[in-house]
Amino acid sequence: MNQNAGPPVWTTITQAAFLKLLGAHESWLQGQGGRRADLSFHDLNDFSIADRDLSKADMTGALMQRVFARASRFVSSTLYGADLRLGQFQNAVLRSADLRGTVLRGADMTGAILAKADLRPGPLTVNRPNGAFKIVRRDSDPTDLSGATFKNADLSDSKVGGVSLLGTDLTGAILRRADLSGSDCRGANLTGVVLEGASLANANLAGANLRRAVIVGANLKGANLENADVSGAVLDEDARTATQAGAPPTPLTPQKIAEAVAAHAAWVKSTGKEGKRLVLKGEVLPKANFQGADLSGAVLANCRMAEANFVGAQLTMVDLSESDLGGADFTGADLRAANLRGAYLADAKLGKVNLGAATSDRTPGTVYRANLEQARFWRVDLRGASLRQVQARGGDFEGARLDDSDFTGADIEEARFVGAQRNNAKFENVKDRDARWR
């Protein structure tokens, strides 16, 4: 079969003609006549298609550099081999889209949904009338995502194997069960990324930033994690071995914990004149019992405290940042002005807790707000909880039970509430730019 080198000739189209075609496509999607859009090998560079629906469209090999497609829909669309460099796809929906062989270098996919999308490598060819074809890009060329931004994007169940993610920003991205096998992730920013059940077999993550990542049940066989930063990450034993994080500190004994709590209580009661403030960082406190304890102002940062008991505890202004609190019980606890930034609270119980603001006698007139930024409240029970004025920017409440909770005055910009139950919940006067509800 004859193979001709060189690029194809892309079909040009005006913005006005494109919008007319797009209108017909949206009518087709709604079953009201119209026609499916065929934009394969079209030149759409610099077009504006924000908040429009191109689901199921054929855009194979299209030129889409610098397009403005914020909040647009490309569900099950074919974008095979398309050039999306520097495109603006914030909050766009590309679920189940065919993105094999695409160029996404420098594109902004912040908050985009790419669940079940296929981003694997793929050759791009152009058929000729005489039966010959041209190879525009060969199979050996990986899908190029280098320098792109996927901050807070959802890539669950996506196929990202063998792609180039050099220097890509995936901060806070969801990659549950995603296939990244063989991908080049050197120097990528994977801060807070969720890799539950993901495949990273033979992936190159040398020097990657994996701070506060969740790496549980992942396939890390053959992965290169040399010099990767896993500070504050939630790791299972396989991940700990693969990342060479080493053995965790020796768990504190119940006796030592009780002594430290008693000393802290004396410190609180005497306003610092007696006892000793509780300050623990990076410690392991398995199933620790703090029920009814006064831990106001204590520091328990970056600690492993899964299934700990904080029932009825006084936790005003406590620092629990970046700690693993999965399955912990905070029922009835006072968490006013608590610092939970980056904490992992999957399946925790926080029913009827107070996460509102607090004041201090030392600084009259100053209001201190609870910090839940980047914290994970997956499937957490927050029914009836007070979260008034909380700082929850980028917090993740996926699957949480928020019935009768109160978020009045809260900052929930970029927060996720996918699958959360919100019956009778109050969200009055909130800052909710780019918050995701479904």
Image (spheres, rainbow, N blue to C red):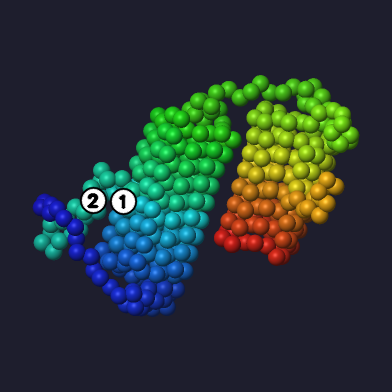
Q: Quadrant of residue 323?
A: top right
10 Å crowding of disc 1: few (<14), some (14-19), many (20+): many
Write the residue at 53% across / 47% down.
172
Q: Please give the residue where the numbered disc 1 appears in the rendered image.
A: 101
Determine whether 295 is above or below 51 in the image.
above
Amino acid type of the residue that numbered disc 2 sits on in the rendered structure: Arg
Q: Position of residue 154 (x, y in %)?
A: 50, 52
Total number of numbered labels? 2
Is residue 190 visible in the rendered structure shown here? yes
Write the residue at 19% across / 64% down.
9
10 Å crowding of disc 2: few (<14), some (14-19), many (20+): some
Is residue 79 visible in the rendered structure shown here? no
Amino acid type of the residue that numbered disc 1 sits on in the rendered structure: Gly
Of residue 154 and residue 245, the one placed in the foreground of this image is 245
Q: Say whether disc 2 or disc 1 marks the residue closer to the N-terminus.
A: 1
**Quadrant of image for the C terminus:** bottom right
Q: Please give the residue where the numbered disc 2 appears in the rendered image.
A: 137
Q: Could you tell me if the residues under marks 2 and 1 are in contact, i.e. CB atoms within 8 Å?
A: yes
Q: Position of residue 377 (x, y in %)?
A: 65, 47
